[in-house]
């Protein structure tokens, strides 16, 4: 049953209220020290909070190599695990909160970070959701994983950020309050825009501690995605990681510039994006698929035995394309998410309700529907169906991923919303803020998804 976003907002507000209690001395939650001077502040002013100057340089934290098996030492095998200025004992669970240091501190929103340290040493798996604030399925996926872990059996640490963009989450928006897309600003900078500072803080304080990272997203703008991984299959460590999720489909993609996935991969953290469903709703099937895939990963990484075996083959797509509406009108689909389609098969009609003209959309090749628009009014050029080209293992072995993928040949974005056309977007003096940083052009590589 879909939960209302209002209910979720109430939950978050409750969380924030609890955070305020914690700041007053209730020990349920931890204040956060900062490692990026000037960009963050401590959530509370506990007298025993560590001095920022004493905090270890996060860049000194070793990022582990590319191996995934524990016997290849993906993570720290020692008994120590510290993050955000606190050392966790084996079997311990903590909730941290941190927030940007802004001029209006009283109006800031803390971002919760959940950390579950297992009883045994092992790697640190990080789960990040709602980098886009309106993508809710990942919030529930992270909740179910984090609070379902048997820490007495867990090897390593699982770190969950269920609502990375709490600002957008509270507003039901994909973006930050400055109307920027957080997932175009990683790894960020300490003295950039708000989006850049936020990305920097998250990256320096948390992401650098990860040995494996899963960034959870959904489709956007009234589109929904078959549960699937987006992975740069040209990167051996990522390729290896992508095969550890059971039967979940994998689509090769290098990801857009400034994405969390790309920035983490750049410092040697094997990272994939997990896409599940559409925005602004909780979808049981998408959540179940995400949870199952991550549980399978925990098993494959030998972090937590699941006593279940998933033996179905994992579909891999090295190539995909978007089918776009050529005319405006009412889109009515004739296929469903996940359907196998043949070349030339009817996908949908687009009917102009005023002139009663009808366009039919067809599949350009044999493949599978990996993502699709919900039935709605569309404008010409709207990306309506994302079709993955079926690839056999032998074909995949012969593919050069770097050159084989055209995710968005015409690089056209979604229709700009009133929000994206706001004047605040116009001036952006930072280097990472080329034209591609604006929300309406984020689809340069993947129409409107990650
Ligand atoms: Zn997203």
Image (cartoon, grey):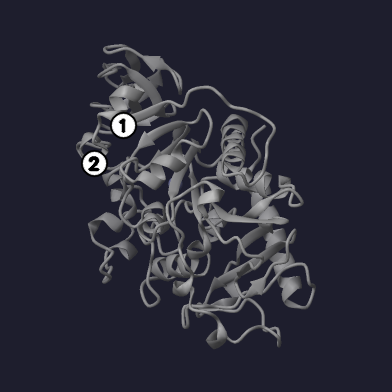
Q: Position of residue 415 (x, y in %)?
A: 30, 42
Count of marks overlaid on the render: 2
- Residue 161 lies in what quarter of the image? bottom right
**Foreground of the two, 355 or 58:** 58
Mark 1 neighbour class, 10 Å CA radius: few under 14, some 14 to 19, many 20 or more: many
Q: State left or right for residue 368 relative to residue 296.
A: left
At a point 59% along the width and 70% down the height, the residue shown is 98
- Residue 29 lies in what quarter of the image? bottom right
Q: State left or right for residue 368 relative to residue 83.
A: left
Mark 2 neighbour class, 10 Å CA radius: few under 14, some 14 to 19, many 20 or more: some
Point out the residue furthest to the right here.
Answer: 26
Q: Is residue 294 above or below residue 321?
A: below
Q: Position of residue 124 (x, y in %)?
A: 57, 56
Q: State left or right for residue 107 relative to residue 182.
A: right
Point out the residue furthest to the front here.
Answer: 71
Q: Position of residue 119 (x, y in %)?
A: 73, 56
Note whether residue 220 is visible: no
* Disc nearer the start of the sequence (2/1): 1
Q: Is residue 354 above or below residue 196?
A: above
**Foreground of the two, 162 or 55:** 55
At a point 70% along the width and 86% down the height, the residue shown is 48
Q: Which mark is residue 402?
A: 2
Q: Is residue 137 above or below residue 17?
A: above
SS at mark 1?
strand
**Foreground of the two, 21 or 52:** 52
Q: Position of residue 355 (x, y in %)?
A: 27, 19
Q: State left or right for residue 376 relative to residue 130.
A: left
Q: Which mark is residue 318?
A: 1
């Amino acid at each position: 049953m879909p939960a209302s976003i209002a209910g979720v907002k109430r939950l978050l507000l409750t969380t924030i209220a609890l955070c305020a209690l914690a700041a007053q001395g209730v020990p349920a939650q931890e204040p956060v020290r900062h490692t990026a001077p000037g960009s963050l502040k401590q959530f509370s002013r506990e007298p025993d909070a560590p001095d920022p100057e004493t905090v270890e340089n996060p860049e000194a934290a070793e990022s582990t190599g590319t191996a995934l098996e524990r016997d290849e030492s993906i993570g720290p095998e020692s008994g120590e695990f510290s993050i955000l200025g606190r050392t966790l004992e084996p079997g311990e669970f903590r909730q941290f909160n941190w927030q940007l240091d802004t001029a209006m501190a009283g109006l800031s929103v803390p971002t919760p970070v959940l950390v579950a340290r297992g009883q045994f040493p092992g790697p640190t798996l990080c789960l990040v959701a709602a980098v886009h604030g309106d993508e809710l399925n990942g919030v529930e996926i992270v909740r179910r994983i984090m609070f379902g872990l048997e820490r007495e059996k867990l090897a390593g640490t699982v770190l969950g950020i269920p609502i990375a963009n709490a600002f957008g989450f509270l507003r039901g928006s994909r973006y930050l309050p400055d109307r920027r897309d957080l997932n175009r600003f990683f790894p960020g900078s300490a003295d950039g825009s708000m989006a850049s500072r936020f990305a920097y803080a998250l990256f320096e304080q948390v992401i650098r501690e990860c040995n494996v990272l899963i960034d959870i997203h959904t489709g956007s703008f009234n589109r929904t995605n078959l549960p699937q991984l987006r992975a740069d299959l040209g990167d051996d460590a990522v390729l290896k990681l992508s095969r550890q999720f059971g039967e979940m489909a994998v689509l090769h993609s290098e990801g857009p510039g400034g994405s969390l996935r790309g920035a983490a991969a750049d410092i040697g953290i094997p990272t994939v994006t997990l896409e599940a469903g559409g925005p602004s709703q909780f979808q049981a099937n998408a959540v179940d698929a995400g949870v199952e895939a991550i549980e399978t990963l925990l098993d494959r990484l030998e972090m937590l035995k699941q006593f279940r075996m998933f033996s179905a083959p994992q579909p891999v797509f090295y190539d995909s394309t978007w089918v776009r509406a050529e005319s405006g009108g009412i889109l009515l689909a004739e296929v469903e998410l996940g359907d196998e389609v043949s070349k030339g098969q009817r996908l949908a009609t687009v009917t102009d309700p005023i002139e009663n003209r009808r366009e039919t959309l067809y599949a350009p090749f044999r493949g599978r529907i990996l993502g699709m628009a919900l039935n709605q009014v569309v404008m010409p050029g709207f990306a309506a169906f994302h079709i993955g080209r079926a690839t056999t293992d032998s074909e995949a072995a012969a593919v050069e991923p770097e050159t084989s993928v055209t995710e968005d040949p015409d690089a056209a974005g979604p229709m700009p919303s009133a929000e994206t056309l706001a004047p605040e977007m116009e001036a952006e003096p930072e280097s990472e803020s080329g034209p591609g940083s604006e929300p309406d052009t984020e689809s340069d590589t993947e129409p409107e998804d990650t």
